[in-house]
Amino acid sequence: MLDNLLFLSAPITVSVLLAGILSYFGNHILSRGIIFIDIAVAQIAALGTMIGLLLGFAEESLNVQLISYIFTVIIIALFALTKSRKQVIPQEAIIGIIYCVGLGLAMLLAEKIPGGSNFITKTITGNLLWVTWDKVLYCFIMFLIIGIIHLIFRKQFIMITDTRNGLPYTLWRTRTYELLFYITFSVAIVKAVPVGGVFLVFTLLIAPTAAATLFTQNWKKRFIWSWIIGVLGSVLGMYISYTLDISNAPSIVTLLGVTVFFLAFGKLAAQKFKTISIKK
């Protein structure tokens, strides 16, 4: 038992970090209604990595990471700067186009890179169980910096997220805050995807927040509960995958998805029972 805990200590720690940062961003993303933006960002990051591999750099080298960040920042900047008072093209449509173009180019490049198809698979599934402590430390430092930035500008970011119609500030001031928000978001996603994979990152971003939103609309409470749900789901799913010798990311994704539906049906049943009781 002790050996298992020692082996899982690094994956559990990084799961706590991932659940925390993604739960925070999940509150913003779910409220803004741009659900699939992290998949688009992750795909562009993977595309940048594949271009780095095509140029002959090692997969986890600094050069490859820089190329990945550059591609991601350029795309996310274009996305942030398209926000206007009268949105002609919905941002979800822009997200879909970005994702499809990124995936199409990645599949084309995979044909030219040795092991390109394996890299795409790894991008989807991640490598959570085999994460090392140096990667955990790197994620902690990056997420801490992002957390400090969002702590400083939390009121502005929340104001923009909560404003459904129009812009809370002048157009360019809003775009500046949006650019800062999306750059930090893209950095978090670029660091999270190699560890957890696209599906797990997307699930941790949306599922715990969706579950928490069923019971509270308060920002602070929603963040705390989504973090707790994300951590518990990740740790339990990881332990199940380890003991049963099955893939870790699909185990966690399935567990968190089932949890959301279970809580949703539970709340619906409780509301119907309450309505029936009142009528009686």
Image (cartoon, rainbow, N blue to C red):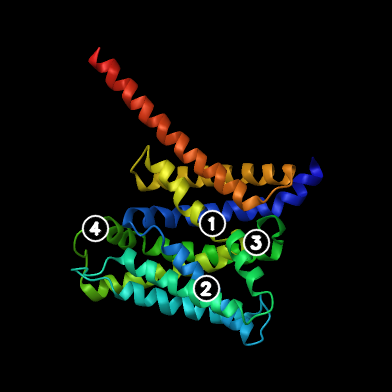
Task: Return the residue at label 2.
Answer: 45
Which quadrant does the C terminus fall into? top left
Task: Return the residue at label 4.
Answer: 163
Q: Residue at x 45, y 63 (%)?
A: 38
Q: Secondary structure at mark 1?
A: helix
Pointer 2 with pointer 3, Cβ within 8 A: no
- The mark nearer the N terminus, 4 or 1, is 4
Task: Return the residue at label 3.
Answer: 136
Q: Secondary structure at mark 2?
A: helix
Q: Amino acid at mark 2?
A: Ala
Q: CA distance from mark 1 to mark 3?
A: 20 Å
Q: Residue at x 38, y 66 (%)?
A: 96
Q: Residue at x 43, y 57 (%)?
A: 25
Q: CA distance from mark 2 to mark 1?
A: 15 Å
Of 235 and 35, nearer the camera is 35
Task: Return the residue at label 1.
Answer: 199
